[in-house]
Image: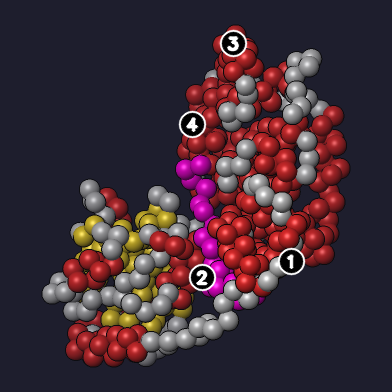
Amino acid sequence: MSGEDDGKRFSELVMPHLGDAYALAHWLTGRDTDAEDVVQEACLRAFRALAGFSGGNSRAWTLTIVRHTAYSWLAKNRRQTVVAVDDLEAVERAQPLHGSDAATRPTPETELIAKADAERLTAAIATLPLQFRETLVLRDIQGLDYREIAEVTAVPIGTVMSRLARARRRLIDSIRADET
Amino acid sequence: MTDPANTPTPTDERLLVHAYLDGELDPANALGIERRIEGDPALAAERLEVETLRRALRERVPAKPLPPGLKRRVEAAVGLTQARMRAQPSWRALAASIVLAVIASSGATFLATTFLGAPGDRIAEAIVDDHLRALMAPAPIDVRSTDRHTVKPWFNGRTPQAPRVVDLAQEGFPLVGGRVDVIASTPVPTLVYQHREHIISLSAVIDTAKATPSEERRSIRGYNLVRWRDNGVAYWAISDLGSGDLDAFVRAFRAAPAE
């Protein structure tokens, strides 16, 4: 494969998703400069891996590489962030997913959520454990479907569903907790 | 594909509510969960809360704008572009700065003397007031256009100088228009940009004071302000955006190529 072909394929497959790549890296690392480093490194990896792209969804493919790169970066720079979450998820899985007790008073509850401003929403997302956070961001901010999220995060669709529901429940609860 | 609901437990039903709202259920399962939502107030509450949360996330979580220059750095890193990295410091930019400097020396004396001493504070207050007034008005802008070639000439004859106008739509800050603010009895051109549903006002105040710090941030009455100085013009950016996003806007504006 000639260098020119690689360049053309990279422009078509990866560059259109640069915005999504940066946003995901930012949500995972939490900082502008770290997100930039991750994106640049991920793009280099993607460029080297172009031959391995077998067609299909180039956005999911690009985001998969970004996520891998971000995880390597986190493991190197902030070790406990990554480790703690696996334990947490095992614990959470053993517990039923509780709902809010808002059945009798749904209106004020949803008003709180509807009123939450950008800053509060962003802060609440940022404090989610990593694997809940990435699932929520991929679905509710970047708009991937469950199958794509399963591909990017390398878990079964059932796990995507469970993480997504738990992430949303945590957000709702933390917005409510902020208020009281 | 996995079938999530072999033996429905409350937890599984909650998951199905999420999948239903995400459009991930086939018609038969969707119908089933719709019926269960109707019959179960807890599931109905879950549905309402999750719907509200999804809307809030979609509408109000600020985008992470691509840092200016990242695209170019990535392209350079993989060898897509080698040349023209630092081409053209641009004659037109130089010409524009000379024009601004000339106008600055004519119109600026008043502002400089009026605010000698504590120049920043009173201008800052005026900037906040003007931003608020604009937000309360039926439209925060006098000239509504996303085209800088429309906005820039509109200031001719209305303000002592036409401001530098750049297009930042690519960076997530589309231009929506401009207005004239009055600060210390002097008409000042103000550009209005948007980020999601947040309005950013950017005023260009001619400033001959030598002592002005090159860049400073402050927060007044809940609004974030960034001031910096380029070519004898003090720029004031104000918004209810978080300081990170406002910084991103300032970086994008300052990094944008000259008109």
Q: Quadrant of the N terminus of chain A?
A: bottom right
The magenta segment is: B58-77
Q: Quadrant of the C terminus of chain A?
A: top right
* Mark-to-mark CA distance, 1 and 2: 24 Å
Q: Position of residue A135 (x, y in %)?
A: 68, 42
Q: Which residue is mark 2?
A: B68
Q: Quadrant of residue B163?
A: bottom left
Q: Position of residue B190 (x, y in %)?
A: 28, 67
Q: Position of residue B25 (x, y in %)?
A: 63, 24
Q: Which residue is mark 1?
A: A48
The chain carrying label 3 is: B
Front residue of A6 and B249: A6
* Mark-to-mark CA distance, 3 and 2: 50 Å
Q: Amino acid at mark 3?
A: Arg
Does residue B209 appear anywhere in the picture?
no
Q: Which residue is mark 3?
A: B35
* Direction from residue B231 to residue B21 in the image, left or right: right
